[in-house]
Amino acid sequence: MTAEGWLERRTAQAPPALRARVFEYAASAPTGPVPEALAAAGRAALARVLDHPGDRSVALDLLAADALVTLALLAQAEQAPEQLGAFASTLLRNDSPGT
Protein backbone atom coordinates (compact mmCIF):
# COMPACT_ATOMS: atom_id res chain seq x y z
CA MET A 1 0.00 0.00 0.00
CA THR A 2 1.31 3.46 -0.87
CA ALA A 3 1.12 6.48 1.39
CA GLU A 4 -0.84 8.34 -1.30
CA GLY A 5 -3.51 5.65 -1.59
CA TRP A 6 -3.74 5.34 2.17
CA LEU A 7 -4.05 9.12 2.53
CA GLU A 8 -6.74 9.33 -0.15
CA ARG A 9 -9.01 7.12 1.94
CA ARG A 10 -8.20 8.68 5.31
CA THR A 11 -8.43 12.36 4.36
CA ALA A 12 -11.47 12.44 2.07
CA GLN A 13 -13.45 14.57 4.56
CA ALA A 14 -10.61 16.95 5.49
CA PRO A 15 -10.79 20.64 4.53
CA PRO A 16 -9.43 20.99 0.98
CA ALA A 17 -6.60 23.41 1.85
CA LEU A 18 -5.33 21.20 4.67
CA ARG A 19 -5.66 18.07 2.58
CA ALA A 20 -3.67 19.65 -0.23
CA ARG A 21 -0.88 20.71 2.14
CA VAL A 22 -0.74 17.22 3.70
CA PHE A 23 -0.40 15.73 0.22
CA GLU A 24 2.36 18.21 -0.67
CA TYR A 25 4.43 17.10 2.30
CA ALA A 26 3.62 13.43 1.78
CA ALA A 27 4.69 13.64 -1.86
CA SER A 28 8.12 14.93 -0.85
CA ALA A 29 8.66 12.28 1.85
CA PRO A 30 10.95 9.33 1.20
CA THR A 31 9.23 6.20 0.01
CA GLY A 32 8.84 3.38 2.46
CA PRO A 33 6.29 2.00 4.86
CA VAL A 34 3.32 4.33 5.26
CA PRO A 35 3.88 5.17 8.95
CA GLU A 36 7.51 6.10 8.36
CA ALA A 37 6.73 8.10 5.22
CA LEU A 38 4.04 10.08 7.02
CA ALA A 39 6.31 10.63 10.01
CA ALA A 40 9.01 12.02 7.72
CA ALA A 41 6.45 14.30 6.08
CA GLY A 42 5.31 15.48 9.51
CA ARG A 43 8.89 16.25 10.53
CA ALA A 44 9.35 18.27 7.33
CA ALA A 45 6.20 20.26 7.98
CA LEU A 46 7.21 20.93 11.57
CA ALA A 47 10.70 21.97 10.49
CA ARG A 48 9.17 24.59 8.19
CA VAL A 49 7.09 25.93 11.09
CA LEU A 50 10.12 26.07 13.39
CA ASP A 51 12.09 27.94 10.73
CA HIS A 52 9.46 30.71 10.85
CA PRO A 53 8.63 31.21 14.55
CA GLY A 54 5.74 33.55 15.12
CA ASP A 55 5.02 33.89 11.41
CA ARG A 56 1.33 33.31 10.76
CA SER A 57 2.05 32.36 7.15
CA VAL A 58 3.02 28.87 8.30
CA ALA A 59 -0.23 28.19 10.18
CA LEU A 60 -1.37 25.72 7.54
CA ASP A 61 2.00 23.97 7.77
CA LEU A 62 1.50 23.59 11.53
CA LEU A 63 -1.92 22.05 10.96
CA ALA A 64 -0.42 19.76 8.33
CA ALA A 65 2.34 18.68 10.74
CA ASP A 66 -0.28 17.82 13.34
CA ALA A 67 -2.36 15.92 10.79
CA LEU A 68 0.64 14.00 9.45
CA VAL A 69 1.79 12.96 12.93
CA THR A 70 -1.74 11.83 13.77
CA LEU A 71 -1.99 9.94 10.48
CA ALA A 72 1.42 8.33 11.01
CA LEU A 73 0.24 7.05 14.40
CA LEU A 74 -3.00 5.78 12.85
CA ALA A 75 -1.12 3.97 10.11
CA GLN A 76 1.20 2.37 12.66
CA ALA A 77 -1.76 1.33 14.82
CA GLU A 78 -3.39 -0.31 11.82
CA GLN A 79 -0.25 -2.08 10.60
CA ALA A 80 1.49 -3.10 13.81
CA PRO A 81 -0.33 -2.01 16.96
CA GLU A 82 2.12 -3.86 19.19
CA GLN A 83 4.85 -1.45 18.02
CA LEU A 84 2.81 1.74 18.43
CA GLY A 85 4.49 2.82 21.68
CA ALA A 86 7.99 2.47 20.28
CA PHE A 87 6.96 4.20 17.07
CA ALA A 88 5.36 7.09 18.96
CA SER A 89 8.42 7.61 21.14
CA THR A 90 10.65 8.10 18.08
CA LEU A 91 8.16 9.89 15.86
CA LEU A 92 9.62 13.39 15.93
CA ARG A 93 13.27 12.53 16.39
CA ASN A 94 15.64 13.24 13.53
CA ASP A 95 16.21 9.54 12.93
CA SER A 96 13.64 7.32 11.29
CA PRO A 97 10.96 5.75 13.49
CA GLY A 98 11.60 2.16 14.33
CA THR A 99 15.39 2.42 14.09
Image (spheres, grey):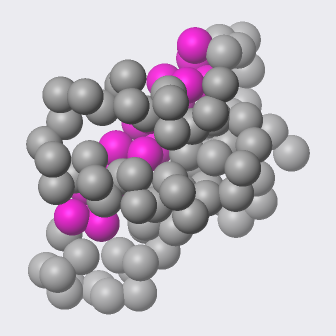
Q: Quadrant of residue 28?
A: bottom right
Q: Quarter holding the C terminus?
A: top right
Q: Quadrant of residue 60?
A: bottom left
Query: Does residue 18 belong to the magenta stretch?
Result: no
> Seen from this angle, which residue lies furthest right?
99
Please tell me which residue is depicted at 35% across the width and 75% down the height of the picture. Answer: 49
- 82, above or below 95, in the image: above
Q: Main secondary structure of the magenta part?
A: helix
3 or 64, which is in the foreground? 3
Query: Does residue 77 belong to the magenta stretch?
Result: yes
Image coordinates for residue 30, horizontal then vertical, percent? 70, 57
- 96, above or below 62, in the image: above
Image coordinates for residue 8, horizontal then vertical, percent? 39, 31
Image coordinates for residue 36, horizontal then vertical, percent? 67, 43
Please tell me which residue is depicted at 31% across the width and 59% down the height of the picture. Answer: 21
- 32, above or below 54, in the image: above
The answer to whether any part of residue 20 appears in the image is yes
The answer to whether any part of residue 84 appears in the image is no
Please tell me which residue is depicted at 73% across the width and 20% down the height of the picture. Answer: 83
* Image side of residue 95 versus residue 75, left or right: right
Q: Quadrant of residue 65?
A: bottom left
Q: Which residues are magenta?
A: 60-78
The mark tally for this picture is 0
Please tell me which residue is depicted at 70% across the width and 65% down the height of the picture. Answer: 94
